[in-house]
Amino acid sequence: MALPCGWRCWNGSSVTELLIRNGRVIDPASGLDQIADVALAGGRVAAIGPGLDPEGGAVLDAAGCIVAPGFIDMHVHLREPGFEHAETIETGARAAAAGGFTTVCCMPNTKPVNDSATVTSYIVARAQATAVVNVYPIGAITKGSAGEELPAYGSMKNAGIVALSDDGMPVMNARVMRRAMERAHALGLPVINHCEDLHLSAGGDMHEGAMSARLGLRGIPAVAEDVMVARDILLAELTGARYHVAHLSTQYAAAMVRQAKRMGLPVTCEVTPHHFVLNDGCLAGYDSNYKMKPPLRGAPHVDAMVEAIADGTVDAIATDHAPHPGSEKMQEFERCPFGILGLETAVGLALATLVHPGRIGLARMIELFTTGPAGILHLDRGYLRVGGPADVTVFDTAREWRYDVTRSASKSSNSPFHGWTFRGGPVATVVGGRIVWQREPAGG
Amino acid sequence: MGNKRGLLGIAGLERADIEALLRRAKDFQQPPGETASRRLNTLAGKMIVNLFFEASTRTRVSFEIAAKRLGADAVSISAQGSSVQKGESLVDTLNTLAAMRPNAIVMRHAASGAPHFLARYLPIPIINAGDGAHEHPTQALLDARTILDNRPALDGLRVAIIGDIAHSRVARSNIHLLSKFGVDIVLCGPPQLLPRELADLAPGVRLTYDMREAIRGADVIMMLRVQLERQHEAPFPAGEYFQFYGLRLEHIALAKPEVLVMHPGPINRGRELSSEVADSQRSVILNQVENGVAVRMAVLEWIIGD
């Protein structure tokens, strides 16, 4: 395949630095699906086609593997600054790479909260200095994520935020949400809400249903999510803002997003792997690794998540990677914090639950990890095209592997998927043309 | 989950285990009029730690008496009111306790599932003396023992459980136990204290908000205390509560003759039940307390006996 001459001149580099050879290249953005080589040079894709010359550069043999645009996780918690005992930008980025992600977006609930250009710039600088993957910060909707005052979105955007969210907390006040959407709309930033009516969730620890009644734990009803998704969709229509539902988990929330899309509203949503894989039955042993927000729902909700992913209602799979150190998770269920690790198991779970049973095809899965989140956040990533960013995720769909959280790249180990066996998963992660993670060879 | 590993709840017990425990508890009942207890040596040389993270009088004392009557040593640790975060103290306590090498730990905790959490890490049998709103297995056993002291069998009885079901571990354990014996169980309370999902907890359970309907034809009425300490929102107005869900003499006529009135204590006269009912011939509340020791002896012997 010929390279566009103009690009070679503009980039200043022409010699292939890494050749990913013989993989099945799937790029949903262009509809490409064929066995081909991908040549990377100068941080860009230099060529895609069969039988490319390595030109003396490194070669990554991808035979039998899928070669896809670099995966994007638009919802992670990297805990830095402020909670470096749980995770840092460096360790979280390494976990991302080990999970096949080349780009992550970090939520602002750090200490201090990312509600100013100063904090945003700090995160950007730390990421440049320590992260092996691309890191984009998400700024707070309200100062301190306290739900009241709006911070200076414009300067935060200039410093590098790609979206707004108070994730971990909802914006309870509808007027505040309206004003936030209006200003975000003017700046072209999407607003991401953690939908949980705090009066309805009222300090609950798990999904409200037969299981919570049995276990004697306080419930978080599905309606706590539903009412806020409904409110926000109406506000998105009123303000014209791009609105995104974080970690959607209920039947009705999915139905409302589906309807909003039919109405042509700029409404999107993400689902986490744990919400399309696990249900509230997992809590029978009071294991705190099954405690997160939104809570693991009842089986009908889980089925509705798979359905919404299959029919196109869901735009992205996001992990909500939420590290907590063992000392905090090793407590009575109702006292331990919410959240689990997600980066290293997302691809394996998506393959196991969505692709292998035939609910969606590989191209659709890749979309959910690439063009989906890139489109929501207006990132110039998530595609494989000559001249585009040299971010590549290589994964396979067949090899069996076991997840051992004690060997995680994350600083924490709060995963319910420890010991799970997966069929297929990440093989190599390439960021800016450089291999930042590679699976250990079989038997090694 | 009842075996030599401990007793975490009634839900996991087999009917045969429950029957064996109830039979054994009968052997341990004090003959009427006898005050000083006979001491046995069944558990001589064994040590039981009572670990109470939440206030308790009758349960803690009856476990202590039960242990001593079987010849075991009993040590009580009260961890309530600690300024340390409870979770941290629980993990710390875990290590301390393991070092003392008791034969069993009797545990009361305000958090549902706390004994299950400890049981995962401790190689010592744990006896659940009440965890949050989850289970209180020895209370259900002593309630069953009390019913059987007055009825030939549990099978086919109709039992009304009335009051703050949502926050009640006593209710949950009783529902599990009675259901295993085919009892017709009616749960009754105000909507915010009666989650609809409890109808699915076990076979034979129905719900009603109408106290008269609950009591009609009942063989046993179990009244529950409104657990003010566990309410997370404005409680049902007290006066209205007694009007709709307080047990009064006029209700007794709706039940079967010889109906048994039970209450896990401590009772609030004029809130859950009137003084006349509490002191009536129909009340077996003090028999319940008495059976607490006998049932806990049977449980201790079952868990740590040779």
Image (cartoon, rainbow, N blue to C red):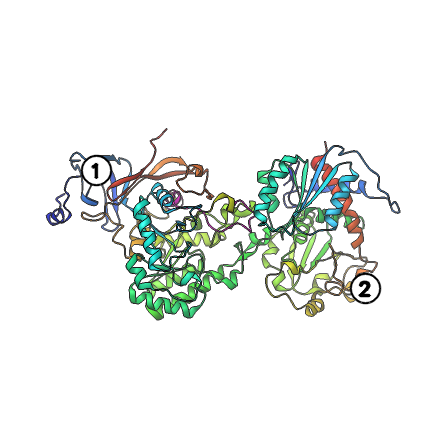
Q: Are marks 2 and 1 in contact (CB under 8 Å)?
A: no
Q: Where does the N terminus of chain A fall, quadrant-wise?
A: top left
Q: Which residues are magenta?
A: A329-355
Residue A264 appearing in the image = no
State left or right for residue A221 relative to residue A19: right
Q: Is residue A212 above or below residue A260?
A: above
Q: Amino acid at mark 1?
A: Leu
Q: Chain of mark 1?
A: A
Q: Is residue A169 magenta?
A: no
Identity of the residue drawn at 49% across and 61% down: A224
Q: Which mark is residue B234?
A: none
State left or right for residue A34 relative to residue A75: left
Q: Which mark is residue B276?
A: 2
Within 10 Å of disc 2 (Cα), the crowding (few <14, some 14-19, many 20+) is some
State left or right for residue A31 relative to residue B229: left
Q: Position of residue A264 (x, y in %)?
A: 32, 65
Q: Amino acid at mark 2?
A: Glu
Q: Secondary structure at mark 1?
A: strand
Q: Position of residue B91 (x, y in %)?
A: 58, 43
Residue A2 appearing in the image = yes
Q: Which mark is residue A19?
A: 1
Q: Position of residue B238 (x, y in %)?
A: 68, 67
Residue B281's quadrant in the figure? Answer: bottom right
Q: Is residue A10 above or below residue A188?
A: above
Q: Where does the C terminus of chain A fall, quadrant-wise?
A: top left
Q: Position of residue A286 (x, y in %)?
A: 55, 46
Residue B42's quadrant in the figure? Answer: top right
Are the residues under marks 2 and 1 on the same chain? Answer: no
Image label count: 2
Front-most of residues A236 and A83: A83
